[in-house]
Image (cartoon, coloured by chain):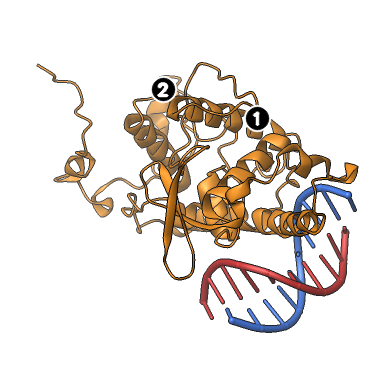
Chain colours: A orange, B red, C blue
Amino acid sequence: MGEEVKIDDGVPEWEAGLPSADDLMPLSQALIPAELASAFKISPEAPRSLVDVNRASNTTLSSLRTGFNFKPFSNDDKDHAMAESDEADEGSDQKKARRVDAADNFIGEAEAEAAKTLKRPRLVWTPQLHKRFVEVVAYLGLKNAVPKTIMQLMNVEGLTRENVASHLQKYRLYVKRMQGLSNDGPSPSDQLFASTPVPRHSFNESSSNGNGNYSEKNENNHVGMPIPMPYPPPPIVPMPMMGMAASSASGYSGYESARSYQHHFQQQYNSMVHQGRDWSGNNIK
DNA sequence: TTAAGAATAT
DNA sequence: GATATTCTTA
C-alpha cells in the first residue's frame, strides 16, 4: 500500500539505475526550445547553475530526513553555505557531478569561496549564547575545552572556531581573575560573564560517558563520582521543535526542555546575527 | 598542515 | 570593552 515514498535510508537506492551526469541534458540547455516557448508564450526559465541544483537537492533531502520541516537557517538567504560545513556534514552528498561546463563550475567555486571569504557580521555574545558556551565548556571541563570542540558541541549555525576562540580567551581570563578573588565578587564590568556563573565542575577534567552522566577524571585516569548532567548532552542536530520552553534560569529537567531550549536558542541566534545583512545579503550571482 | 593560544588590531 | 585578526607554537 504505501506506494508513497519510502524514506528509510534508501536514498542511495534511488540513484541506482539513474542516468549518469554525462547522460543528462546539460543544465544550460533549455527544456523548451526558444521557438516553442515563444509560440506558446511561455517565458523562458531562468538559467540554473549547478549550485542551484545542489541547493534544491539539499533542501529536499534534509526535508525528507527530518520528516519535513527543517529549515537550515533562514529561508531567504540561500547564499551562505556555512563555512564550517567541511567537517560538519557527513559527506552524504559525495555525488557531486563533476561534469559541468566551465561557466557553472566557475560560479560554484566562486560561491564556495565567497562563503568562506566573505566577512560575517561581528558576532554578539548574548547571554543566551554565552550560557550555551558556558554549558559546553563545563561539559568538557575547562581543560579540555578547546575552540573547535566547543564550537561543535554548541552546534550553532554560523558560529566559527575563531568566534569561539576569541570568546574562550576572554572567558579564561575571567575565570582566572575570579579564582584570584577568593570570594565571588563579579565586577560590574563583567556583565555578561557574571550573567552565567562558572559552573563548579568546569574546573575538572571531565569526559562524557555518553550516558547522560559525565565522570570526573584526573590525569591518572582515576574516575570519580558520576555527576548527572545539568545541561543538554552534546546536541547533534539543530532541532526545530515547537512549544516554548520556560528556560528560565532554573535548569532543565530533561531532554525535552533541552531541545526546546535549543530551538529557542537557535531562533534567538538567527535574529541576532541577521541585523547586518551581510553574509547573506550579498548576492553572489 | 591544522588548530590552540597569545598578542594585537579594529 | 568586545570581538576579530594575526602571529607563534605545538
Distance from the alpha carbon under mark 2 to that under mark 1:
51 Å
- Residue in view at x 23 percent, y 40 percent: A11
For disc 1, the chain is A
The residue type indicated by label 1 comes to: Gln
The image quarter in which residue A220 lies: bottom left
Residue at the image position 69 percent from the left and 56 percent from the top:
A168
**Nearest to N terminus: mark 2 or mark 1:** 2
Residue sticking out furthest to the left: A1
Q: Is residue A129 at least partly visible in the picture?
A: yes
Of the pair A261 and A84, the residue shown nearer to us: A261
Asked which secondary structure carries label 1, the reply is helix
Q: Residue at x 53, y 56 (%)?
A: A149
- Residue sitting at 14 percent across and 20 percent down? A3
Which residue corresponds to mark 1? A268
Q: Is residue A259 above or below residue A111?
A: above
* Image: A82 above or below A270: below
Three-letter code, disc 2: Ala
Q: At which x and y percent is residue C4?
A: 75, 56
Reading the image, the residue beneath label 2 is: A39
Is A231 or A81 nearer to us in this picture? A231
Percent from the top left, x then y, of residue A110? 57, 56
Determine the image quadrant of residue A101: bottom left
Residue A12: x percent and y percent? 21, 45
- A76 left or right of A35? right
Mark number, residue A225: none
A80 and A176: which is toward the camera = A176
Look at the numbered discs 2 and 1 and tell me whether their residues touch, using CB distance below 8 Å: no
In the rendered structure, the residue with mark 2 lies on which chain?
Answer: A
Placement of the C terminus of chain A among the 4 image quadrants: top right
